Image: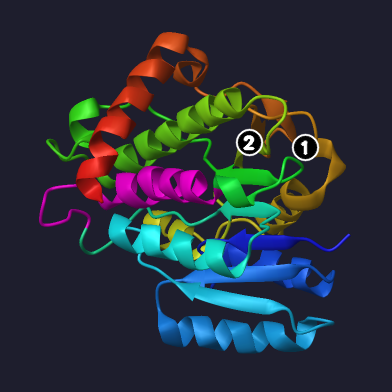
Amino acid sequence: MKKTILITGSTDGIGFEAAKTLTEQGHHVLIHGRNPDKLAAKLEALGPLSPNGEIDGFICDLSVMAEVKNFAKSVAEKYPTLDVLMNNAGILKTPRPFTDQGHDVRFLVNSFAPYLLAKKLLPNIPKTGRIINLSSAAQNPIDFDALAGRKRLADMEAYAQSKLALTIWSRHMADDIGADGPLVVSLNPASLIGTKMVKDGFGIAGKDIRIGADILVEAAIGARFEGHSGEYFDNDAGRFGPPHPHAEDAGMIAKTMDAIETILPNLE
């Protein structure tokens, strides 16, 4: 059955590889990027792979919440039914890691933007739909001053904290939606896959990116993920398993969600 699938951060890496596979399978794939020229080139590359030419692209800087809101609005207006939202975009190192207001771009792109996008697009996602959030094996306890932009962290620490925040809100959203709503899962696509992020961040070639792309495809449409809303899939282990303990602690989940909901309006 053909599905409409939005994959953020899909102009390269595992996001683009997953987009290629899903396009070849006949799904209506919506890709997203920040660079218009790069997005256009990737749409051109995907065109011949689509049996029906059903691909589309959207531009958005996920570090700017006003753009994220407009992005969500554009998708929602054009696609009343969105079967899968895959929050794949992520950032580790960047030449400008902090905004003029002091906010860490890792928290903005990896935590706040996917949360805002999921909230805005939730009315368009059917009960049988899915929200897939890319987390990481790297999950560290959140420094709430850093989350709020009052403290600066090193690259990897900010990244690991931002991924725990995403894992936490994934669990909360799944619980809030309940059994009658779309499935919400977080997943580690595998450690040290050979993406640009890994090459820039760690200076290594990394593993075959198909490892990550294949699990994204399965998460989007595969039967193995059915009935696992709110859970965390660890592709290093090849199974659902425990995330960081804070993502299963009711008090820490409540504290994190209160912080996210308090900070987010000031970012918009």
**Quarter of the image containing the N terminus?**
bottom right
The first of marks 1 and 2 along the sequence is 2
Amino acid carrying mark 1 in the image? Phe
* Label 1–label 2 contact, CB within 8 A: yes
Measured as percent of width and height from the top left, residue 142 is found at: 32, 27
Tell me if residue 186 comes above or below residue 220 in the rendering: above
Q: Is disc 2 placed on a helix, strand or loop?
A: strand
The alpha-carbon separation of the residues under discs 1 and 2 comes to 8 Å
Residue at (31%, 49%) from the top-left corner?
Answer: 108
- Which residue occupies the foreground of this view, 191 or 144? 144
Mark 2 sits on what residue?
185
Label of residue 63 in the image: none
Mark 1 sits on what residue?
225
Name the image quarter holding residue 201: bottom left
Amino acid carrying mark 2 in the image? Val
- Which residue occupies the foreground of this view, 131 or 82? 82
Residue at (38%, 28%) from the top-left corner?
Answer: 140
Name the image quarter holding residue 145: top left
Residue at (43%, 19%) from the top-left corner?
Answer: 253
- Which residue occupies the foreground of this view, 34 or 210? 34
Residue segment shown in magenta: 97-121
Q: Is residue 112 magenta?
A: yes
